[in-house]
Amino acid sequence: MKGSLNKDSGEKVIWDQMRSSTGNPLPGPGSQSSRATPKLLVWLILFVSVTYIVYTLKLVSTSRAACDDVDDPFSTPRHITTTTSLLANTNNNNNNVTEDRTAQILRLEPEPEPEKTDVKHIAFGIAASAKLWAQRKNYIKLWYKPDSMRGVVWLDRGVANRSGEGLPPLKISGDTSGFGYTNKQGHRSAIRISRIVSETLRLGLKDVRWFVMGDDDTVFVTDNLVRVLRKYDHTQYYYIGSLSESHLQNIFFSYGMAYGGGGFAISYPLAEALSKMQDRCIQRYPGLYGSDDRMQACMAELGVPLTKELGFHQYDVYGNLFGLLAAHPVAPLVTLHHLDVVEPIFPNVTRVQALQQLMVPVKLDSAGIMQQSICYDKSKSWTISVSWGFAVQIFRGVFSPREMEMPSRTFLNWYRRADFTAYAFNTRPVSRNPCQKPFVFYLSKAKFNSTMNTTFSEYVQHRVPHPLCKWKMADPARFEKVEVYKKPDPQLWNRVSSFQEL
């Protein structure tokens, strides 16, 4: 047995030597060397893993801080701290100054408000004829101020012109003989007039926001024109004006058309678009009557509707404008037209003198001109209507505001055979009751008291025969004049616009 055991042990040694690559005997399972090797490998792997994790965390932390400072627009405190610390490393003695300068650089300055539209942003294009120029230029002198306004009078041919008259420059309209005109009731000068906006644009006037068209017998209240245009964005397409007072006129032409005599305004971008296509547009409408409907036809092709403003007045009526002016709509008075056709707005003076008289209160309070106030005297049972800057009426009896705000028919329709149903607005008849005929007091003078910040206007009774009234009540005939005290309110229409937008 013993010999056999020794023999087996020797064979095992030989086999172990053959399995070893070096020829040395391999360590046995119970040796120290076999136990140390796995521990070393574990420590090595653990060391490498920890090192990798630490390095990765440091890299991620650094990248996040850099991204936060650059990309996060709401991390202002961190950005200020970082910038301050960097500057402080450069100069430790200027920490406070650096913080102030950094905060000043990072502070967002508010954007300046855009400049409000003013009269300097308006270019007027005035249609005139050489035949009537000597007479109608006096209307232009009433409102045009060459020192602060820009405009051009477009004529069909040359006229004698004297410098220093306070008028806009005079120019001759371009040749329109190549355009077709087939309307037998009109005049081909309508083509020339319809191109005035485009011709004014091509003059290249700087800083223009609006082109405003009118006739030589159109009188503008320019302060109110500016108030109206300020409501609109001049960078968009706008075509602003008003209709005729005659329903038949609006039917024959269009309820979507601005009447040129009453004046209309076109924004600069729309004028640019119009100038590029107007001549081709005009060629497509040879049968139209006037310049206004040609302009509206081109607006329709451009897809721009009329924006109506009640203060532009065509006044397609005859006779006395008193009823219309004494019950002016709640809107700023912008224009008056057809002044050669109607009677003077004040009695016993010429048309130009009457308008000169109107311009006195216009200069004092343009926002309030013609605005109606309705009052009542209970003790006398009177109704009093004040159209500021124009006239005061005293009625016996009590009339509702609904009645008083309707114009009385002191005027005739543009179509003389038409009756009161041919107006484009409500009217009321002149009372046939002798006791309800109004006593009218016209403006005689107006002035401004700077100490009291108040306007004073005086209205003197217009003496005309009154029929006998048998009512037993106070008689307004014994009053010679009416005095009205009013504080100017330049912001009146700004508040009205804000209220209408709610």
Image (cartoon, grey):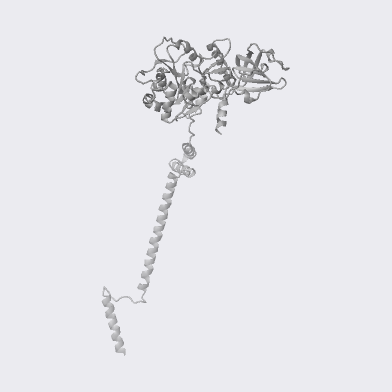
Snapshot quadrant of residue 473: top right
Q: Residue furthest bottom?
A: 1
Q: Position of residue 458 (x, y in %)?
A: 63, 15
In the displayed structure, 481 sits above or below 208; it is: above
- Seen at 45% across and 45% down, the residue is 72
Q: Between residues 206 and 136, which one lies in front from this camera angle?
A: 136
Q: Position of residue 390 (x, y in %)?
A: 59, 17
Q: Position of residue 168 (x, y in %)?
A: 44, 15
Q: Between residues 134 and 398, which one lies in front from this camera angle?
A: 398
Q: Is any atom of residue 274 visible in this view? A: yes
Q: Between residues 176 and 134, which one lies in front from this camera angle?
A: 176
Q: How many marks?
A: 0
Q: Position of residue 113 (x, y in %)?
A: 49, 30
In this rendering, would 223 be left or right of 286?
Answer: right
Q: Quadrant where the C terminus lies?
A: top right
Q: Is any atom of residue 207 visible in this view? A: no
Q: Quadrant where the N terminus lies?
A: bottom left
